[in-house]
């Protein structure tokens, strides 16, 4: 089964430009990155500032998050990301979202219509439990 992973950005970043997969430095992002890399599957980052980002894309640090955006701004962000996804995302049989509710809310229905199977394995877990889940589970 071909999988595709989408990982949301985090607030903790390096103070200088770096490849996106190295820019975000929180323990949660680092564990999510290790988890998806172990899978060997394609993955992308959901950035509040840039939308859909290839992990190798060089980004400068920024201070934007969907968690402080109003509902209309989040809908507009999701429209932008869906447009990016239509041209960038590879074919897959399943999408795994390692992203919080506000990053998923308007993307998840569209992803289900395109890919059919969308998993959110850490849905409802607090940060500590997410860290534990990423440490104890294998990609599937």
Image (cartoon, rainbow, N blue to C red):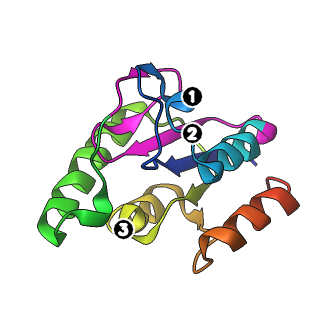
Q: Nearer the viewer, mark 1 or mark 3?
A: 1
> Left or right: where does residue 113 sit relative to residue 36?
left
| Mark 1 / mark 3, whichever is N-terminal | 1
Q: Give me the residue at 60% from left, 68% from top.
A: 120
Q: Give me the residue at 52% from left, 56% from top.
A: 115
Say whether residue 2 is visible. Answer: no
* Residue 60 rendering spot, x and y as whole percentages: 34, 24
> For mark 2, does the 10 Å Cα neighbourhood hold few (<14), some (14 to 19), or many (20 or more) residues?
some
- In terms of depth relative to the viewer, which is nearer, 12 or 136? 12
Say whether residue 40 is visible. Answer: yes
Q: Give me the residue at 31% from left, 54% from top.
A: 65
* Residue 104 rendering spot, x and y as whole percentages: 41, 64
* Residue 14 rendering spot, x and y as whole percentages: 48, 30
Question: Label 1 vs label 3: CA separation?
Answer: 23 Å
The disc label shown at residue 22, or none: 1
| Circles 2 and 1: CB atoms closer than 8 Å | yes
Question: Label 2 vs label 1: CA separation?
Answer: 7 Å
Q: Which residues are magenta?
A: 38-61
> For mark 1, does the 10 Å Cα neighbourhood hold few (<14), some (14 to 19), or many (20 or more) residues?
some
Judged from the image, the secondary structure of the residue bearing numbered disc 2 is: loop
Quick one: which residue is furthest to the bottom in this view? 124
Which residue matches tag 3?
A: 102
Which residue matches tag 2?
A: 25
Judged from the image, the secondary structure of the residue bearing numbered disc 1 is: helix
Against 15, residue 128 (above or below) is: below
Question: Label 2 vs label 3: CA separation?
Answer: 20 Å
């Amino acid at each position: 089964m071909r999988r595709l992973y989408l990982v949301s950005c985090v607030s903790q970043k390096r103070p200088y430009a770096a490849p996106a997969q190295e820019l975000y430095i929180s323990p949660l992002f680092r564990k999510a990155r290790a988890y998806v890399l172990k899978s060997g599957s394609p993955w992308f980052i959901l950035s509040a500032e840039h939308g859909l980002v290839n992990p190798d894309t060089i980004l400068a640090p920024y201070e934007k998050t969907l968690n402080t955006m109003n509902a209309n701004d989040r809908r507009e962000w999701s429209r932008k990301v869906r447009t990016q996804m239509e041209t960038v995302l590879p074919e897959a049989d399943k999408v795994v979202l390692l992203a919080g509710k506000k990053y998923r809310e308007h993307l998840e229905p569209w992803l289900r219509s395109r890919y059919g199977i969308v998993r959110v394995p850490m849905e409802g877990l607090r940060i500590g439990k997410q860290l534990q889940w990423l440490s104890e589970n294998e990609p599937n």
